[in-house]
Amino acid sequence: MVASSDIQFTDILCELFSPEAPPMSPAAAELALSVRLTDQQKQRMIELADLSSRGQISDSQRRELESLRDAGNFLTVLHAKARLSLMQEQKAN
C-alpha cells in the first residue's frame, strides 16, 4: 500500500478493483461494462488535449481535462475488474 500522504484516487481504485478483491456478480459486471464516457465527453477530452498540447489551456480547462482523464481511468479499471469477474464466473461453471 502507498503511504497515506501519497495516496492518489487511482491508487484507491486499483486496490478496490484489484484481481485479489472479491469478484463482481455477473449482473454487476455486465452493468459495469455498459458504462462509458459519452461521445461528447470523448470529443471534449480531445479538444482539451489539443489545447494543452499547444500550450493554450486555461487552469479551469486543465482541471476539466484531468477530471475527464480520471473518469476514463476509473472506467478502465472498472471494466478490467468486470471482465476478470466474468472470466472467473465462466471458469467456475
Image (spheres, grey):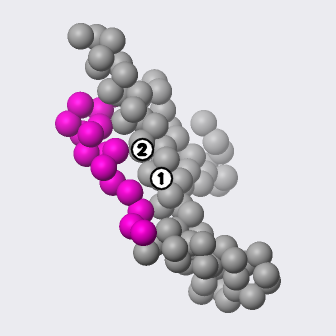
What is the distance, in whole Å, between disc 2 and disc 1 at their CAs? 6 Å
The disc labelled 1 sits on which kind of residue?
Phe
| Viewport quadrant of the C terminus | top left
Residue 75 percent coordinates (x, y): 44, 51
Answer whether residue 31 is visible to the viewer in this image. yes
Quadrant housing residue 84: top left
> Is residue 26 magenta-colored?
yes
Residue in view at x 59 percent, y 86 percent? 60
Q: Is residue 49 left or right of residue 93?
A: right
Q: Is residue 69 left or right of residue 91?
A: right
Q: Are marks 2 and 1 in contact (CB under 8 Å)?
A: yes
Q: Nearer the viewer, residue 34 or 17?
A: 34
Which element carries disc 1, helix, strand or loop? helix
Q: Which mark is residue 74?
A: 1
Which element carries disc 2, helix, strand or loop? helix
Residue in view at x 65 percent, y 45 percent? 3
Residue that numbered label 2 is attached to: 78
Residue in view at x 36 percent, y 36 percent? 82
What range of the chain is rendered magenta?
23-39
Residue 7 percent coordinates (x, y): 60, 51
The disc labelled 2 sits on which kind of residue?
Leu
